Image (spheres, rainbow, N blue to C red):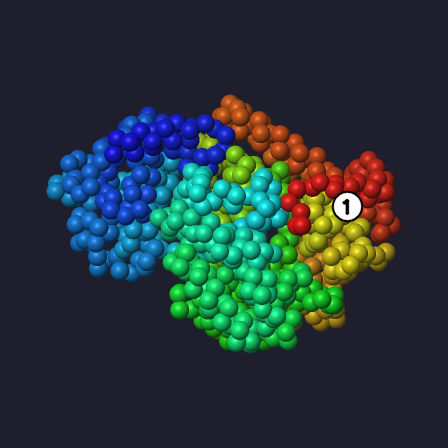
Amino acid sequence: MLAVFTALMAFTGSLRAEDGYALWMRYAPLEPALVAHYGTSLGEVVAPDQTPTQRAARDELVLGLTGLLDRAPRLNTSAVTGHAVVLGTPTSSALIAPLHDEMASLGQEGYLLRRAHIGGREVLLVAAPRDIGVLYGVFHLLRLLQTGASLDTLEVRESPRLQLRVLNHWDNLDGHVERGYAGRSLWDWQTLPEWRDPRYTDYARANASLGINGTVLNNVNASAQSLAPDYLAKAAALADIFRPYGIRVYLSARFSAPIELGGLATADPLEPDVQRWWRDKADEIYAHIPDFGGFLVKANSEGQPGPQDYGRSHADGANLLAKALAPHGGVVMWRAFVYAHDVPADRATQAYTEFAGLDGAFLPNVIVQVKNGPLDFQPREPFHPLFGAMPHTPLMMEVQITKEYLGFATHLVYLGPLYEEVLQADTRARGEGATVAQFLTGIAGVANIGNDRTWTGSHFDQANWYAFGRLAWNPQHPSRDIAAEWAAMTFAPDPEVVEPIVGMMMASREAAVSYMTPLGLHHLMARGHHYGPGPWVDGGPRADWTSVYYHRADRHGIGFDRTARGSNAVGQYAPDVAALYGDVTQVPEPLLLWFHHVPWDHRMASGRPLWDELVGHYTQGVRQVQGMQTTWAGLQGRVDAHRHAQVAAFLSIQRREAQWWRDASVAYFQAVSGRPLPAGETAPPHPLAWYQALAFPSAPGDGR
């Protein structure tokens, strides 16, 4: 025990180095008044230590209390000798056993926090049906302590609303991270399985603190080698590290692996040899990883192989893998991000066209993974029409945590409001109030994590990992409250720190939409790497990889007509939603140009013509970033110098690039429309050709 405590104290010391490594688990000393208030209740930890998860829960609580209270609590395994925190399940602790029936409704991952009296002594209970719930409950208690919440009337019952809460790592086996802006991959495949970097455990701790219970280790643009025996041994080493923290490992599977690894002539899902190969591969994987979660599959999209190569459906392909995994309890997460080899009239309609008719055709352990919007993680999209359209098929929502289209790691863009906007969108599929969240079995987030010391490439991008996890646990949790939690734990619980930071965060997504893609515009980024503006992008191998395909600006107007007169994408939504989006007088203005091609002089709600409103949005976005800079400058001295300086530098980059976005976009759309700038608006400092000539061949995170 002394050795464990010494190690914990050493780690506590490293956590207080304010370089961002500690994430929201800094456990920095509380103010003396809070220490005095909490200290009487937290002097002892009574916890079992017979399983790895029990030890993880106990050690995390000891680590947290030691840092927060600046002293270590006493440790016991079963007896209460003073004011204590008591951890356990009905089977691991006689002190918790009387709560067995009461906790039955909490499920396999839920927990209970409560004040109680045991043996005449006041205690705090962290109780759960299973060990993993105890660990989640410990993190909840530490969150309350870090944010300065009162424990006087503590009574918490929590269970996750979604079954699967998964990070998708787009990490390649060579260490490159596609759409990654936080350095190289966290996984060092070269040194696994022998070297188990302690950082892997800290990654697991961070995910468990949010209730994330799955991780896909490799890129959806998968290499078949990830299923080869040597890589399965490496994945098994990570699974061993993650298991005590409730995290199951998944792998992206390349559909053509039977050819590339197995030497077969085909990967046709109806061929018996192919079916046998996948059964044998599943058996092999589970021999390495007994609790393997299953496969994530990208098929027949962006050149990836799939069942359509053999004239088969997505259901045929998914069910092939589902049958192989079913005896072991595994699942297939089959991505609905697809589009045809031939450029369609509207790429945004492709997923619905291919999947809606397959509702009910998938086996029960197949989950169709649907992006939050119908196109591709844009700064703003309407919710995907498949939500509500496949009532007989389990669905997951896929969101990006990494900011491929939102300024990479250098722009402060808090994504909580984006996730919340989609989760709470009313599909009207079952009448009013049928939100997207109600149709979900799980949620997946494309991770923004790399080997950068901050984990995510910037201090504020940690908040998006945090917000994803909190909303995956409870999609009803307000994103503003999540931002306040994160700010208090990451910087300080002082309201004079938290309130201005939350103000910055909550305004940041709308600011980015304004200086990048206002009023429903989308896919205006530069070709390939998506760094910076490129509304002029045209030509190339596919029209739907260009910007002009989507904005359709000409001398008369701008926007993509998705009404019944155009591509009729609105027809993929429930009738009430289709009527709303399809009516130019009713569609929400933030989605106007997504659904309608409208004249430049179209009268907006403000009374201004569309052209004036568009330019005004671009300018307003820049001003909002300037406001964020001012707010952050006012926190100097309240935030440690190292992190304050780095955030200030990144905000300076964001301010410069927001201006670039504004000027380049205004220059282009003015050239197309031929309209003068609205009164009071400043002309771009360079001609359009200057912006078009900019090139960035080494932009990070490109997909190669």
**Which residue corresponds to mark 1?**
665
Q: Residues within 10 Å of mark 1 (few under 14, many from 20)?
A: many
Q: Residue at x 84, y 52 (%)?
A: 673
Residue 574, position as x, y percentages in the image: 58, 71
- Whole-percent x and y of residue 521? 71, 54
Residue at the limit of the structure toward the front, as seen here: 263
Q: Residue at x 16, y 50 (%)?
A: 94
Q: Quadrant of the N terminus?
A: top left
- Do we see residue 347 in this rendering? yes
Residue 395 horizontal side relative to residue 163, left or right? right
Looking at this rendering, what residue extends furthest in the left direction?
A: 119
* Residue type beneath disc 1: Ser
Number of callouts: 1
Residue 82: give x, y in percent of width and height. Answer: 17, 35
Q: Residue at x 26, y 31 (%)?
A: 2
Q: In the rendered view, does 357 fall on the left or right side of 200?
A: right
Q: Who is closer to the viewer here, 183 or 111?
A: 183
Q: Is residue 443 left or right of residue 554?
A: left
Which residue is rendered at x = 47% and y = 28% of the image?
18
The answer to which image quadrant residue 116 occupies is top left
- The image shows residue 72, relative to residue 221, as above or below, that is above
Q: Is residue 438 above or below residue 109?
A: below
Is residue 40 or residue 84 the one in the foreground?
84
Could you tell me which secondary element the residue under label 1 belongs to?
Answer: helix
245 sits left or right of 410 in the view = left
Q: Quadrant of residue 43?
A: top left
Q: Is residue 460 visible?
A: no
| Residue 475 percent coordinates (x, y) | 46, 55
In front of the other: 139 or 78: 78
